[in-house]
Image: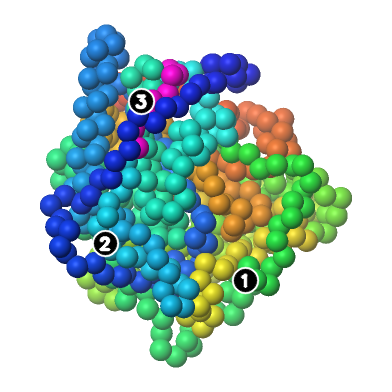
Amino acid sequence: MGLGDKAKSLFQVKIMKKEVVVPLGVSSLIQKHWLPVSNLDLLIPSQLKFVAIQCYKNPASDSGPQASTNAAESFISSLKRGLAQVLVPFYPLAGEVVRNSLGEPEICCNNRGVEFIEAYADIELENLNIHNLDENFVVGKLVPDNNHDILVVQSTTLKCGSVIVVSLFDHSISDAYSANMFILSWAEFVRSKPLTYDPPSFRRSLLNPSRTFGSIDTSVYDKYVSVVTTPENTSPRNNDNPMNRLYYIKAEHINNLQTLACKNNNNITKIESFSAFLWKLIAKSSTTTDVEKQCKVSIVVDGRKLLGRGDGKEAHNAMSNFFGNVISIPDWGKRICDLNKEPLNEIARDVHKCLKGVVMKEHFSGLIDWVEAVRPKSGMFRLSSYKIDDGPSIMVSSGLRFSIGVVDFGWGRPILGTFYFPMGIETIIKGSYVHPTLSPIGNGDWLVYMHLFKSQFEFIDKEVFNFFKPLTFDYLSSIMDQLPYLQKDDISIKSKI
């Protein structure tokens, strides 16, 4: 589909059915209870939602309309059966968020269930503009219109019989690691396969603060700021509106980028190289005339492995399966003029050094203690780069170790699997956001979700058009055609990141 052919993407979505899927075999007589959120959950604003998008081609589409319809109906029924099963170990997702006497959120585990929406869209998968997320994957269309539940699922059957599964998560309860764990387990229940993960852990005591608060890292005060004391982001970029797009990057370009970044330092990872490249790119694209302003980069760091170190095998296993937010988002700033003149390898070295200073257990322990010291300002924090007088900023969150792009619900791998923020991202950052995942066939290509401003997209499409390619159905279809010819052992979701 041509990127300018908008007529094909003008389609209607009709809600066919709504129902509530409850955990399988759970009696309504079971007493409800309340599960507290952790201190790291409290860092995430309650308005922040994200979705997992998975597009599946109907294997019976060439067998006639009736066969295609029957296959889609069977597929959706299996999704609901599997959801009822997976909600047993993931029971808090079937509850609701309430406020305690201090105004802090907690989960009321009442097994009320998860809303499952069945919809129909009068468009073929090949005509869907998957590059421009703002055109189709918007709330009320392919994304469910629900801003209060912990989890909502919408399955949309397309004219061709393909099905798009969109799962909407409350980020104040779940990070992407947790969502990935849930979706993979859900698919394994659907297919009656052995579970990759052990049952999820909801042991909030694993993230308890220390009794003395002696581990507080004073640098935390520079990373997060209170919404109450931070001026609102009153559109300092005038009419330069944020937009959401999907791109892909060829494996050879990623490898070449890492080679350039590793000059004089062989320890630079792919995601560090990519972050340094984006940092430099965003600075160069800046429309400000004040090159002395700080341009900031922040990188999402998962703390599960770090917090599980040294506390025995049981604690390690519990942290690896911990459901909730176990992330920190440290940021660093450099002057725009410095980023413009410094070579990529020097900027990558700075990224590597900065990350090394926070990828440690003490950093997360200090963050937990700091939140405890300033409670109960729940959900009242933003990154410090949200300030109006800051220069441009970008946040990088890696999905390269997630299996979102290879999850099989019975129809094989999705032609597309990615995470996306349809609403609320402006509650935590003022700037841009980028999230790469691996291609569904593990050929080393990256699929990249980008939340940037219009002027930044215009700059990227002009300056680095050979690096960032708009994601299209034709590209995804071409790589999926390679899947039958690849040996199973050659397909990996792992990457040296």
- Is 7 above or below relative to 54? above
Give x and y (percent) for residue 257. 58, 41
Q: Secondary structure at mark 3?
A: strand
Density class for disc 2 (Cα within 10 Å; few <14, some 14-19, many ≥20) is: some
Between marks 2 and 1, how big is the CA–CA gap?
Answer: 32 Å
Density class for disc 1 (Cα within 10 Å; few <14, some 14-19, many ≥20) is: some
| Residue type pointed to by label 2 | Asn
* Nearer to the camera, 485 or 187: 187
Instruction: Name the residue rendered at 71%, 57% in the picture.
Output: 233
Between marks 3 and 2, how big is the CA–CA gap?
Answer: 31 Å
Name the front one of labels 3 and 2.
2
- Is 203 above or below relative to 139? below
* Nearer to the camera, 118 or 271: 118
Give the side of residue 422 with respect to residue 92, left or right: right
- Is 356 above or below relative to 207? above
- Residue 226's disc number: 1
